[in-house]
Image (tube, grey):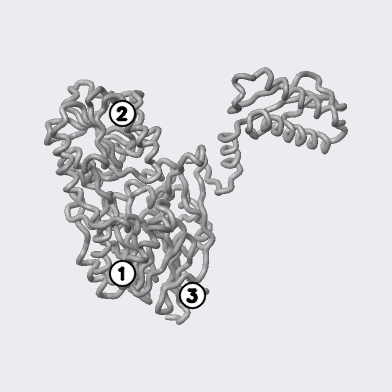
Amino acid sequence: MKKNNQLIFCPLGGSGEIGMNMNLFAFGNDDAQKWLMVDIGVTFADDTLPGIDLIYPDPGFILDKKDDLLGIILTHAHEDHIGAIAHIWPQLKCKIFATPFTAVLIKEKFKEKKIEISNYLKIVDLNGTVKLDPFVVEFVTLTHSILEPNGLCIKTPVGTVLHTGDWKCDPNPLIGNTVNEKKLKEIGEQGVLAMICDSTNVFSPGRAGSELDVRESLLKIMSKKSKRIIVTSFASNVARMETIFYCAKNTGRQISLVGRSMHRIYKAARQCGYLKNVIDPVDPRDVKNISREKIVYLCTGSQGEPMGAMMRIANYVHPDVIMEENDTVIFSSKIIPGNEKKLYKLHNQLVKNGIEVVSEENEFVHVSGHPNQEDLRDMYNWVKPKSVIPVHGEHRHMAEHINFAKEMQVPYPVQVENGDIVQIFPGNEPKVIDKAPSGKLYVDGNISVGEDSQSIRERKNLANNGYLEVTIVINNKGKLIKKPIISYKGLPVENEKDEFVYDIEDEVEKISKTFSLNNAKQEKNLIEALKISCRKLIKEKTGKKPYTNINLVRI
């Protein structure tokens, strides 16, 4: 082994934010360095980005090294860990490694894009091993809020790194195995150079809690309800899905799944051998034959998504599901920070219509999938890492995780953000040695654009200031042949439309007279002058500076 070999870790997404996780590991020297990518996720856009749904990390840094990329290893199937794969993989064309449930959902993503992936997708058994020289990657079964979550024990010629992925300690996960504590202790005994660890719930004391406890609580709640029950939850939480099936059966009700994601996850879970002992769901179109006290709906839209099933039901526009006074809606999910406003609006709308709302605010209906402080304490005691690198959190989470690691007497905790290149080996103490280019790409329609994209800037301007279009027909001497054609959108002039149009016409005529259109440059100057003067006039009248387009037709 050459002395100048390095073991490198570099997050491109998920460090400094919760979502769009993408992490890189490298081993080798300047002449020959091999890379691994762990996870390739998205985050969801908010109202500040009109027209954008998905955001993912800019992969430019690893695209430059794609010939040395050995593969993408997926820890689990949440969108913030796999959601960008169909957008980025076509540029990488590398192997993908995933456990069976994650692999089923990956295949679907590529099928939607009409990409044949079967030659590249390698299915890994639970607790299986992947050899990608110089790396040996051992999958370690953990518990989380989705099927088949894995930690990764990444072995190299100079030592071992444990990448936890998303996890918690759930003694009764209901579906799937419990945490492979034995394996984690063995990894710890062999020595761990660095642990890359989930920081999401580092501020939360105690334990994250168990799915079994949620099941018992939901059964009590649903047993007391006499009318229709609608439960909304994260579709990916198959244990919660099974709980709703269980509660339906035990309260003498039928169950119906509503929403595309709910059907997709149910189908994938069944395909992988899960959900075998549950009652059969009823097609929502057939529920009209079942009385309202004998049905439970399980639907998507737990975060108040505008097109989610829950919002459509609440707005009485869903084709198959109706709600009536005294029905109950149970939000069996966390209110994700940033979604409070739209969720409270939805809750208020339901209550106003005589619907009972049950949520984490008034009942025990949800447990997190991430480790609270006592869960973290267990992991630290099992693994005993020499260094900890917190990821999967905002800066405040990761800084608090550094404090926690110090309390746990970890010698070398390292705080990072996206783009930091951390040298884990050589040297006793891992440290940030360089910065890789990092950033975000926005999925705009079906095209990926950069953060400073003109399309997004223009759309924000349109959203904030409105739109003005002026078409003029003009001769070479600058004389208007007919009145300008003026159209506008989003300007607050409802009560003064005629006066507004007259003023623009006067301004256009006045400016046009000062130009002689002998050449193309003059034409361009006239368009620019009209744009500036019209925007100035509208700013004086309305306080808005609209996106302005001038069409010039010469006669």
Residue at numbered disc 3: 29
Please report the residue visible at 34 percent of the width from the left and 55 percent of the height from the top.
Answer: 200
Please report the residue visible at 67 percent of the width from the left and 17 percent of the height from the top.
Answer: 498
Mark number displayed over residue 407 = 1
Say whether disc 2 or disc 1 marks the residue closer to the N-terminus. 2
Residue 172 visible (yes or no): yes
Query: x and y percent of residue 5 in the render?
Result: 45, 77
Residue 123 visible (yes or no): no
Residue at numbered disc 2: 350
Q: Quadrant of residue 364?
A: top left
Q: Does dot 2 land on a helix, a strand or a loop?
A: helix
Task: Tell me the quadrant of the picture where the C terminus can be found.
Answer: top right
Q: Label 1, label 3: how many angstroms apart (C-alpha)? A: 35 Å
Image position of 99 (left or right of 453) = left
* Circle 3: residue type: Asn
Q: Label 2, label 1: how many angstroms apart (C-alpha)? A: 46 Å
Residues at marks 1 and 3 touching, judged by CB atoms closer than 8 Å: no
Please report the residue visible at 34 percent of the width from the left and 62 percent of the height from the top.
Answer: 197
Q: Label 3, label 2: how many angstroms apart (C-alpha)? A: 61 Å
Label 3: how many Cα within 10 Å (few below 14, some 14–19, many 20+): some
Query: x and y percent of residue 344 in the render?
Result: 35, 36
Q: Residue 484 or 142: which is nearer the viewer? A: 484
Q: Residue 202 or 103: which is nearer the viewer? A: 202
* Circle 1: residue type: Glu
Label 2: how many Cα within 10 Å (few below 14, some 14–19, many 20+): many
Q: Does dot 1 land on a helix, a strand or a loop?
A: helix
Task: Tell me the quadrant of the picture where the N terminus can be found.
Answer: bottom left
Label 1: how many Cα within 10 Å (few below 14, some 14–19, many 20+): few
Say whether disc 1 or disc 3 marks the residue closer to the N-terminus. 3
Query: x and y percent of residue 173 in the render?
Result: 20, 51
Q: Quadrant of residue 182?
A: bottom left
